[in-house]
Structure formats: structure tokens, C-alpha cells
Amino acid sequence: MAISLADLKSTRNELPPRLLFHGVAGIGKTSLAAEFPNPVLLDTEEGTPAGIDMATFGLLTSYQAVTDAMGALAQEDHEFQTVILDSSDAFEQHVWRETCVRNSWKSIEDPGYGKGYLAADAVWNEFMAGCDYLRRERGMTVIVIAHSEVKQFDEPGKSPYSRYDLRMHKRGAAILTDRCDYILFVGGKTEIKEVDVGFNKKHAHAEGGGARYIFADARPAFIAKNRSLNMPAQILYKKGEGFKALAPHIFPNAPAVADGKAAA
């Protein structure tokens, strides 16, 4: 079929976003995700904080269980608007076991030289295709919860330094960070202060308040990204009002947000 300039037309991406929240344990990632409209949880680690009321399929202990739950969301009638995977690092173990089953391996290391992790890309991409179906055909926002850990980062032309990165194998992490529209680091601000303890000695200690921030731009200290033209580099938010702070930037054309929830 011939293509002509007459076939050109204006396009605008109005699909719901794919978000990845990462941060240290207990910082409030799942609580933040639970504020999104009509959420349903794909629970792979039983890490949901006490006091959060959210629909769940229960603990999903295999890759097949996760994809079966996604299939139900794809095929059955429901009013859920947000699907949450908690967490990516626990789900990664399911991905590896599924890869081993398909290849008759005892462990992901069996084929050697990183070949097992390379083969796992196909399973990760299947999962992401399922996420894309839910957002495209069912209008669902996709949120992936990940834990952070400090890793050494070797940036070309610079000395190595440490930063918060996903607590995952680099191949799975790369697929998630490539495919998600937003990578948001949830954390606080820490200042290092020195105190004179006498005898010409100083003691360094960390100070930080209880304020929570959502960081949307990458910094040497952590990975982040966003595809919003007007999103600030950092957003201060109060507990229970994270979605209200994020919504104007990730749902700019949605109705006004009230009481921390988007209007239906």
C-alpha cells in the first residue's frame, strides 16, 4: 500500500499513563498508588500497608497467576481504573521461574553467560504487552511499585558514584524503565551537617524531616523520568494527598481532582 503526504494527520497520545514508583521500604509507595482512582492490586509480596482498603486477587504466587488476573481485568466487566503491581522485584522471581519452566532449566543461571536473563526478556515483554492492553482497551492506568537500593553507577567521563536504582536485574529494570512513561522516586530530603565535637574533630550526621517528595527528574542520587512538559522536578505532598498533587501533571485534561480522587 502506497503512503502519501496526504495521509498525514495530527496525533496526540491520550492513553492512560504507565507509572513506576520506587523508593526505600516503608516510604509510602503503595499508599500513594492506592490513592489513584478505583485501584485493583496485583499482589506478589503481601507488602500492602495496614489500613489500606483496596481490591486484590490475593497473593499471586506465580507468573501465570498474575497474567490470569490481568486476563480477568481484560475480559470481564468491571469499574476498576488503575491496576497496581506490587512489587516488580518480587514479580521478577516469577518471571525467572516461568522462563526456567519454558526452557527446562533448574535455575535462571543454568544456560550461563547471562543467557537466562536474556531469555527472560520475552516473558517481561509479554507482561508489558498485557499492561498495554489494559491501558489501551480498558482505559486503565498502570502502576508498578519497585524497591530501591543503592548501586554504583559508572557514568562515562565521570568518576563512579552511588545512586538509588531499582532492586532488580539490569535487564528487567531496563524494560520497565524504557516502557513506563513516568519513573517517580518517592523519598524525603536529607541534609548532611557537621558538628564540632572538640579536639579539632567534626562529626557528620544526617538530618531530615518527615516531609515526602515525589521526584520526577533524574538526578545523580536517583533514577527518574517523566513525559509531562510542565511537570516540576519535585513535588512536595502530604500523606493522603499524593494523587491530588500528581494528577494535574499526569492527567492534564481530566476533570478537577477532589478529595484526592479524580472525578469520574
Image (tube, rainbow, N blue to C red):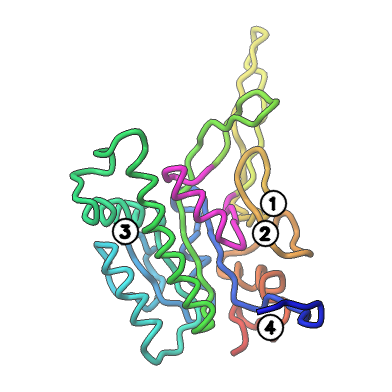
Tag 4: amino acid:
Ala
In this figure, which residue is indicated by the disc labeled 3? 45
Q: Are marks 4 and 2 in contact (CB under 8 Å)?
A: no
Disc 3 and disc 1: Cα gap in Å?
Answer: 28 Å
The image shows residue 142, relative to residue 121, as above or below, that is below
Disc 3 and disc 4: Cα gap in Å?
Answer: 32 Å
Q: Would you say residue 186 sits in the magenta stretch?
A: yes
Tell me if 18 is positioned left or right of 60 in this view.
Answer: right
Q: Do the residues labelled 2 and 1 touch (CB within 8 Å)?
A: yes
The image shows residue 45, relative to residue 82, as above or below, that is above
Q: Position of residue 156 (x, y in %)?
A: 66, 29
Q: Residue at x 30, y 51 (%)?
A: 96
Q: Position of residue 47 (x, y in %)?
A: 35, 59
Q: Where is residue 42 in the image (x, y as percent from the top left)?
A: 36, 69
Q: Which quadrant is the C terminus positioned in?
A: bottom right
Q: Residue furthest toward the top?
A: 199
In this figure, which residue is indicated by the disc labeled 1? 217
Give the mark nearer the N terminus: 3 vs 4. 3
Give the mark nearer the N terminus: 1 vs 4. 1
